[in-house]
Amino acid sequence: MTESFQNAQSSDRTRPRKQIHLGAHFPGVNNTTVWSDPDSGSQIEFSSFVHLAQTAERGLFDFFFLAEGLRLREHRGRIHDLDVVGRPDTFTVLNALAAVTDRLGLAGTVNTTFNEPYELARQFASLDHLSGGRAAWNAVTSPDAFTGENFRRGGYLERERRYERAAEIIAVARLLWDAWAPDAVEADPATGRFLREGAVEAFAYLGAQFDVSGTFNVPRSPQGHPVIFQAGDSDQGREFGASHADVIFSRHTEHADAKAFYADVKDRLGRHGREERDLLIMPGVSFVLGDTEAEARENAEEVRRKQVGPQTAIAFLEQVWGQDLSHLDPDGPVPEFDPETADVHITRGRVRHQQDQSSIAQRWKAIADAKELSIRELVIETTARLQLVGTPASVAAQIDDYVQGDAVDGFILVPHLTPGGLDRFVDEVVPILQERGSFRTEYTGTTLRDHLGLAPAPTKRGTPQ
Amino acid sequence: MTDRDLHLGVALAPAGHHPAAWRLTEDRTRLWNPGTYAAQAKTAAAARLDFIAVDDSFAPPSGLVRETQGTLDAVAISARVAPVAAGIGLLPTVTTTHTEPFHTSKAIATLDYVSSGRAGWEAKVSDTAAEADHFGRKAVAEPEELYAEAEDAVEVVARLWDSWEDDAVIRDLPTGRYIDRGRLHYIDFEGPHFSVKGPSITPRPPQGQPLVAVRADADAALGLAARRADIVRIAPGNPDAAHTRRAAVRRAVADAGRDPDRVAVLADLVVHLADTDAEARKGLEGLDRAAGRPWRPNAALFAGTPEALADLIGRWHRDGAADGFTILPAALPSDLDAFANRTVPILRESAGFRREYPGATLRDTFGLDRPANRYAGTVTR
Ligand SMILES: Cc1cc2nc3c(=O)[nH]c(=O)nc-3n(C[C@H](O)[C@H](O)[C@H](O)COP(=O)(O)O)c2cc1C
């Protein structure tokens, strides 16, 4: 796992050091988050969010990050009960966090399919006002009918049109964010006018997805346009990121893969009239620290065993095999029989990145045979997300090498413990990054755009199309 | 009737409820900065008021350039002030016409979490074509239909709050289960306007059921208020009108099979305060001149001294015209400051208004128990 990080190339010495960007991901509702640990706190009490956000701010992070899923995951037709379950409303928790932090960016994942643009634009503009310019929107597009069962229109959107809708929703949002001129509020007792005449423009948008018109009722917010994140990985998703996003939350962490993704997406920017610095690539990554390399590796193994308990091992196997395998012994051998190909959607409500179940099963069987692994050992081996494992100094070096080597612009760190999982990173890794001259020693700006080094939002963008 | 608790809330606004109130504020061009709302909320909490109401709609700005324009999302404002204003209830308005009930439910549940049990919401219909055009999905409907849809939305929101039992998180190491899924429930709501499957993504909020407020000036709203509201807001022009409306609301609540003494009927009251009556009236006239039109708010308007206001509030309350008030300060923060620092202390002596919050939650403030979960003991699927 760690080897690939050590392969990272040091950068060209003539170039000034790139500055690392860091985000703090609130632990999610999947098995990365370890709840069996005695130190694992509440997934929903506000105090957990406050602790992580204030820790991130103490560490001078760029932003706090919240994921979202609008339907509880199901496995074999029943609510999945082995992982953490339960999350807050994105906007509400971020606005409350704005009260207990000062500079930290507040990035929220919000779906583009099950929301309407006037309402969303207003919610993000409100968060931007109420946080003094710290709002970001991770625009995710999942259109599945399973989630749609919680909403007025049900599963109305075909998968092929998910990015059409996302692009239009962002186009409308930008139209609305630009509707009030920056100097619209005159508030001059001498003239008696609160609003400058003509400073609020009406809008009208007609597209395949929306037919909306009227006047926006929120004044232009401190950042003008909140920062836009994108997390889809398909070709359409990358194109969407290259044309619309300020940050891509990627899942490409293995070094060569990260470099390839970085180059691919940054290459696309030119076609959209944008420059390299207009889009940051920040993969999500977990981390495990130790006083020595050996201790860190031991800690990582321990975390992996907690992430993949016996029941979770069987559930993963069932996902690949597409059938009930509850009779199998997790410490026993991997089944000889072939997977069920009919019911590949045994797990619903979770983002899927791979489709071909039977080839995965073949690969898993081969690995188990070669290494003589039990079911649980196999799942621990095959589902490992790439982690930063090592001493604070070596983890700092790995992060810095990735950034200086143009594999990433920074990382969104995913702690596996709520809420204290970031404490040690902030106390021990951040100072080393600072000593290396690669990470800020104080916030120099007040807005998230400032932290990310993004240009101010233009005041008028034409309607796309 | 005099042993009824007096309830007092305040409706926040960036500069005040008078359309020209911006003239009196210091930081005129930065009205939407979070400090504005936080300061108002802290003043209200220090006076131990019941709640902050944050009115809201998707309506476009009026376009009148002499008047304050621009509004932020009400749940957002409520969440932003929750951690800094202790003890006070938070009552944002959310429309039932355009906003997804699933989103509303988790937003208010989360407001309840970030405030440790002080959330409620005012369920409001959107009845203008301008709002409908902002969404572009449906035409504006007749009031009867809007309120029928509102009732379904309130039902869905309430069911989703109960869709997790309180003890659903079990963290059972031997079986590897984080939750007992038998204590999570599909709500399977189906109605003419929407179907919602559930369960919520957010666990049951601290209060179990946050409070529901409904404005019941229109007769079309009476059924919704009678069947669903914990707090009914009315905007009568005088004590007689208040008396009549409160009696009608209480009859409707009783007809709906609920106890009218558990539903607080609160009158909106616009206030502008000064050391003398003449000064207060002069102040209002000045604001009207600044707006270029006489302001006729859609509620009773009091301009006078803080002492006379205490007298009026005590009288309406004693006579059964209202269980309390939602104060709409014409100018902020000055009218709220005067109300909190001068009117409220008098009401403590004369009308028994509280000195401390009775408990930690908004339900406690309104003397309401934490309700049992409607799904407790039922089997999932
Ligand atoms: C790293 C990463 C994190 C994601 N997080 C979320 C999330 O929190 N909520 C969600 O609904 N989708 C999430 N997604 C899914 C997507 O953003 C995207 O909408 C979905 O994968 C479909 O687009 P695609 O086909 O381009 O991947 C995530 C994707 C990636 C790669």
Image: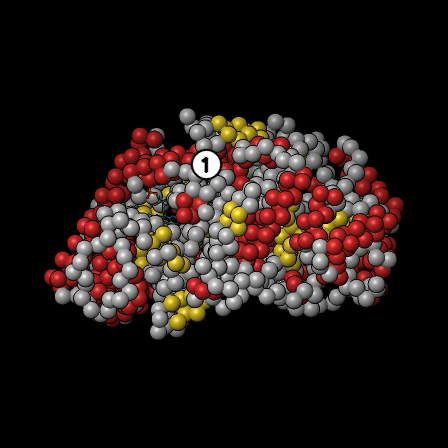
Q: Within the image, what quadrant is residue A428 found in? A: bottom left
Please name the residue shown 24% across and 61% down the image: A379
Residue A282 in view here: no
Front residue of B31 and B9: B9
Indicate whether B167 appears above or below A255: below
Residue pictured at 45% horizontal, 67% vertical: B169
* Residue identifier under label 1: A169
Q: Secondary structure at mark 1?
A: helix
The answer to whether B342 is drawn above or below residue B299 in the figure is: below
Residue A380 in sight from this viewpoint: yes
Which chain's residue wears label 1? A
- Left or right relative to B11: residue A180: left
Q: Residue at x 67, y 40 (%)?
A: B144
Q: Quadrant of residue A289?
A: bottom left
Above or below, B28 relative to A312: above
x%, y% of residue A417? 38, 65
Q: Residue at x 38, y 67 (%)?
A: B177
Q: Residue furthest left?
A: A370
In depth, the one of B251 and A170 nearer the eye is B251
> Which one is in front, B163 or A435?
B163
Q: What's the residue type where badge 1 is placed?
A: Ile
Where residue B185 sits in the image (x, y, percent)? 48, 59
Is residue A250 found left or right of A71 in the rendered image? left
Crowd band around label 1 with a 10 angstrom C-alpha radius: few (<14), some (14–19), many (20+): many
Quarter that holds the N terminus of chain B: bottom right
Which image quarter holds the C terminus of chain B?
Answer: bottom left
Q: Nearer the viewer, residue A441 or A454?
A: A454
Taking the image as shown, residue A74 lies to the left or right of residue A379, namely right
Residue A169 position within the rendered picture, expressed as x and y whole percent measured from the top left: 45, 36
Q: How did the renderer colour the structure?
A: secondary structure
